[in-house]
């Protein structure tokens, strides 16, 4: 994901600060908001290029600041054409949370629709050909899936069928509302998350030395990726790709490789998936 896209994600996620009102607001109390207990309109996941905030619809609550947690449980790796069961899940120790909502979309790194979302019970609903450009798909809570009055947690299961071909990493963008069920747009807690599903095992495609840095490029590196040089784990490494492939940079390892020297490189992800050995010879 590029720096521009990451910036867009940060900025657009703030939209959910306002969007929470659209989950469960009571129009009689808050006339400028809308009642969408049956599910918000498309485009409220915090994904890139989605709607911007309207000052008249601002949600008077918190964004990613409450004591709760909202997660998407998806596979680490997908196989093209395979179907996976996904869970969107709220957890909190705040006993005032008594209604629940969510919305999810799945996009490629280029922000195109990735795969197909499908409801498997009456607690969720699918919106097709909607959102920016009317070419995205969403799944969200239904009117029967807000678990009104329930405390501690709320969760939904649904299916996702991966794209027919390998489209590289895909990102599940999601936002959820842990509401107080008071019938207004006050005091609700909005949470956002983005979960990356890789298209296969990590793979090194190249390497280079720039000054003291050793930069290893490839596919399917995660945020916790580690670099090994001739079997030794390298310190001061970082993944500039924010979970989506790109490069792992070891800031001090370039000086360990002399010009003309050949070394063996490996990347290990946080889930212990590991690349094959990659032979790198530093140019003279």
Image (spheres, helix red, strand yellow):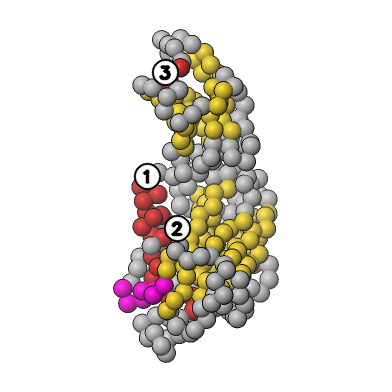
Image coordinates for residue 133, horizontal then vertical, percent = 42, 61
Q: In the picture, which quadrant includes the N terminus?
A: top left
Q: Which residue is mark 3?
A: 255
Give the residue displayed 63% in from the left and 36% down from the top. 273
Q: Are marks 1 and 3 in contact (CB under 8 Å)?
A: no
Q: Which residue is mark 2?
A: 47
Question: CA–CA distance between discs 3 and 2?
Answer: 40 Å
Which one is earlier in the sequence, the residue at label 3 or at label 2?
2
Classify residue 81 as left or right of residue 211.
right
Provide the residue span drawn in magenta.
55-61
Q: Is residue 142 above or below residue 6?
A: below
Q: Which residue is mark 1?
A: 3
Question: CA–CA distance between discs 1 and 3?
Answer: 27 Å
Label 1: which secondary element:
helix
Which one is earlier in the sequence, the residue at label 1 or at label 2?
1
Give the residue displayed 64% in from the left and 58% down from the top. 86
Label 3: which secondary element:
helix
Residue depth check, mark 1 versus mark 3: number of the one nearer the observer? 3
């Amino acid at each position: 994901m590029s720096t521009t896209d990451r910036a867009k994600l940060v900025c657009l996620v703030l939209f959910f600060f306002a969007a929470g009102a659209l989950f469960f607001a009571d129009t009689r109390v808050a006339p400028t908001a809308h009642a969408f207990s049956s599910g918000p309109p498309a485009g409220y996941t915090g994904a890139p290029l989605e709607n911007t905030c309207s000052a008249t619809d601002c949600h008077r609550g918190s964004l990613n600041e409450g004591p709760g947690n909202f997660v998407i449980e998806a596979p680490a790796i997908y196989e093209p054409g395979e179907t996976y069961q996904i869970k969107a899940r709220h957890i909190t120790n705040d006993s005032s949370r008594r209604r629940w909502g969510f919305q999810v979309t799945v996009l490629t790194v280029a922000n195109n629709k990735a795969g197909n979302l499908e409801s498997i019970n009456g607690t969720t609903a699918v919106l097709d050909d909607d959102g920016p450009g009317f070419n995205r798909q969403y799944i969200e809570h239904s009117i029967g899936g807000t678990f009104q009055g329930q405390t501690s947690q709320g969760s939904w299961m649904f299916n996702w069928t991966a794209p027919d071909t390998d489209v590289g990493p895909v990102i599940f963008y999601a936002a959820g509302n842990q509401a107080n069920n008071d019938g207004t747009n006050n005091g609700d807690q909005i949470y956002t998350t983005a979960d990356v599903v890789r298209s296969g095992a990590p793979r090194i495609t190249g390497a280079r030395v720039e000054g003291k840095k050793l930069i290893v490029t490839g596919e399917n590196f995660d945020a916790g990726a580690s670099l090994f040089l001739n079997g030794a784990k390298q310190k001061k490494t970082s993944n500039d790709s924010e979970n989506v492939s790109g490069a792992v940079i070891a800031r001090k390892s370039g000086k360990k490789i002399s010009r003309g020297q050949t070394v063996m490189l490996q990347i290990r992800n946080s889930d212990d998936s590991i690349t094959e050995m990659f032979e790198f010879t530093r140019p003279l």
